[in-house]
Image (cartoon, rainbow, N blue to C red):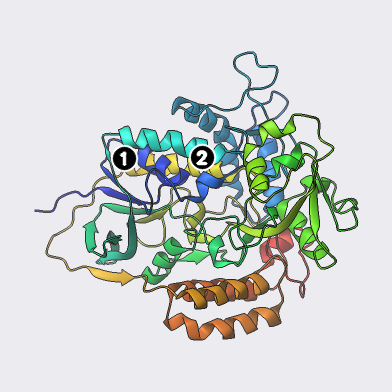
Amino acid sequence: MALPRPVVVVGAGVAGLCTALACAPRPVLLLSRGRDGAGSASVLAQGGIAAALDPTDDAAAHARDTLAAGAGHNDAALVRQLASAAPEAVAWLQGQGVVFDPAAENDGERLALGREGGHGAARIVHAGGDRSGAVLIAALAAQAQRAAHIDWRGDVEVDALLLRNGHVAGVRIGTTGGAREAIEADAVVLATGGLGALFAHTTNPAGSNGAGLALALAAGARLRDLEFVQFHPTALAAGGSTLPLVTEALRGAGARLRDHRGRALMAGVHALGDLAPRDVVARQVWQAQHGGPVWLDATALAPGWHGAFPGVMAACAAHGLDPRTQPIPVTPAAHFHMGGIATDGEGRSSLPGLYAVGEVACNGVHGANRLASNSLLEGVVFGRRLGAHLAQRPPVLRCRQAAFELRERGTGLGGSELAVLRETMWHAAGPQRLAETLAQAIAQLRPMAANGWEARLADALLHATLQRPCSLGAHWRDDAPAPASARLAQACG
């Protein structure tokens, strides 16, 4: 007799936690590398959640800004759904225990609304100043630990998917002790985050290395839009690979980018100036660095501004900087992946039984360039939506005698090869790209593909980047033009 199995959710960032919570009462096995959500990119998120909460703002304007930032490559219907669901998502998070920052003239209900790049209005709510991600994770993790339907196992790594008759039917995990275990599942949800750690400079933690994407690639799931990698323009230029983020909200508060001569970097470049979409600002910083260092100058802000930016202050202090009196050295860094496992609005992939949500997924909502503070929002809205879908989905009854087919991600690269891969990706697939450099990178990494899954994933991204012949959003080809209209953008394939 076949028995129903739990839903397995892989990843405990915002998207994974929201999915797991919304699955109730269906049993969920939540698997994560760390414990309590620690180690996820969500924890490091300084930006807040975009939502049209001001009476002078509305969801239609939020959607228009999202589509503009995405260069017309978005799924417009899903964008409208995301923007419309944002206010309720904020209210739901408050119900989960998230305390958002109140407005200065607080009447007991109004929240402080900040403005970030690409937004035509102030619509960003924060929690704990620039520590929104950590506050969200703490609240959601506490709810997941109390939820009777969730069994949370930390310190494990999913290294293979189990397929039965063409359906994803479970996962194989490895523990810190080296043991391996096959776990059957009614459905598998990948919520494993992005791949920023495949680049030499990133704002992501080391675990954001595309491991979930590599699992899907090995299993034969369809991927899409891999070439669209967002580079945040203002990471702290502190050396090393994982760089502290200097939140966009600081520019929203009035900080200005300056080149090595002290000139306003964004003057005359874009109508929104320092708050132009991230791809525009990142390219300007990238180009200006050829002449010398680039700085973010917050020294002219009103006294006391630093109280709203504890994360920025701590990161600067750790490197001997006081941004109240000194400009902050900044550099672009890989920040967010708009591409991923191809899914529909319910999180379904091309493989029956396999779902994906959050940064590892690509349903088209972000298009060619994510609008600031839409990522945590995406995780909440589409995580809850996927969880509700799975809660209502009839259990899949499977025969115990049917054999599994194991689809392994494979071994990873050694330290020296991984360092070479990251540098190669940075120079070939960074904020500005050339066909010749991309082809050279593909040839350079090809021998590594037999040794590590990171090289196979990087190869897929490089090929996607080479095969898109024009510039679009965060994908900028120095040797190809940008489309002049949305119609041309749709034809840019």
Image height of 117 relative to 96, above or below = below
Q: Quadrant of residue 108?
A: top right
Label 1 crowd (10 A; few <14 / some 14-19 / many >=20): few
Residue sticking out furthest to the top:
107
The residue that appears at 72% across and 36% down in the rendered structure is: 115
Image height of 471 relative to 204, above or below = below
The residue that appears at 72% across and 59% down in the rendered structure is: 487
N-terminal of the pair, mark 2 or mark 1, is: 2
The residue that appears at 42% across and 61% down in the rendered structure is: 212
Q: Nearer the viewer, residue 143 or 401?
A: 143
The residue that appears at 34% across and 44% down in the rendered structure is: 390
**Kind of residue at disc 1:** Gln
Residue 291: percent from left, percent from top: 85, 66
**SS under mark 1:** helix
**SS under mark 2:** helix
Residue 105: percent from left, percent from top: 70, 17
Disc 1: which residue: 392
Q: Nearer the viewer, residue 403 or 441?
A: 441
Q: Is residue 82 visible?
A: yes
- Answer left or right for 11 relative to 118: left
Disc 2: which residue: 134
